[in-house]
Image: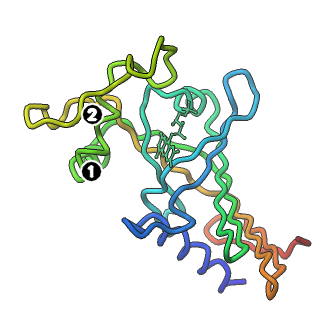
Amino acid sequence: MQRILDQIWALLTEGAHAGAERSPFTMVQIATLGLDGAPRVRTVVLRQVNRDQRTVTFHTDVRSEKVAELKKDPRIAMVACDLDAGLQIRLEGIARIVDRGERRDAVWNASRPRTLILYRAPLPPGTSIEAPSDAHVPPESDDVERNAGIENFCLVDIEVSKIDYLDLSPSGHVRVRFIRDADSWRGVWIAP
Ligand SMILES: Cc1cc2nc3c(=O)[nH]c(=O)nc-3n(C[C@H](O)[C@H](O)[C@H](O)COP(=O)(O)O)c2cc1C
């Protein structure tokens, strides 16, 4: 079981640092409770993984609906899947929105300008528009102030409390659930 726990964190860490290579654990799906109580799910890029603090992190726009949802109810779930390996990793936890401070600013400063353009969009994500061109953001130019849009940029840390691992490969057929106790993970085998 310890080997599986190590594998889970290694796969997630690899996903967050895959760069141009990408791994099946780079693009993940996160689910929240909508403001109306209905489930909502969307794809995000896994950006940081910290096993010691048992957090995984993605970046988003503070104006997006998911942030409003998480402010109302911070419970969050994530799923990612390696189709070739027949592996699924599901996480559950509590989201913390980091919308200011040194850590947020350092990530902004280290990000490629191309990835920051969206945060400079004048219209909040989710705004109804007449045509796609209404939401067009001009490409990055040299005269854009480096910090323009930073107020819209946040990190979302998921503090993980439950992990569900499923290996459906021909040699696998193993499912384990890990629950976080005071300061360690307690694993139980589960029928797949
Ligand atoms: C490949 C891919 C990667 C994405 N990565 C992110 C991301 O890292 N952060 C983010 O906020 N949205 C990302 N999105 C967009 C979201 O899936 C979603 O459409 C958007 O954030 C609005 O979601 P919301 O209305 O539920 O807040 C990505 C979409 C795709 C297709």
Q: Nearer the viewer, residue 21 or 160?
A: 21
Where does residue 126 sit, x and y in percent of width and height?
A: 51, 22
Task: Check mark 1 vs ligand 1: CB closer than 8 Å? yes or no.
Answer: no
Label tally: 2
Q: What residue is drawn where x is 73% and y is 72%?
A: 186
Rendered position, 33 above or below 178: above
- What is the spatial separation of the Cα atoms under label 1 and label 2, in whole angstroms? 11 Å
Where does residue 87 sit, x and y in percent of width and height?
A: 70, 72
Q: Residue furthest top?
A: 130
Residue at image mark 1: 111
Q: Residue furthest left?
A: 143
Q: What residue is drawn where x is 42% and y is 45%?
A: 59
Q: Residue furthest right?
A: 191
Where does residue 170 sit, x and y in percent of width and height?
A: 82, 84
Amino acid, disc 2: Ile
Amino acid, disc 1: Ser
Quarter of image, res 138: top left
> Dot 1: what SS?
loop
Q: Nearer the viewer, residue 140 or 105?
A: 140
Residue at image mark 2: 150
10 Å crowding of disc 1: few (<14), some (14-19), many (20+): few
Q: Nearer the viewer, residue 71 or 134?
A: 134
Q: Image check: 173 left or right of 56? A: right
Q: Which of the two discs, 1 and 2, sits closer to the camera? A: 1
Q: Nearer the viewer, residue 70 or 12?
A: 12
Lower position in the chain sequence, tag 1 or tag 2: 1
Rendered position, 96 above or below 66: below
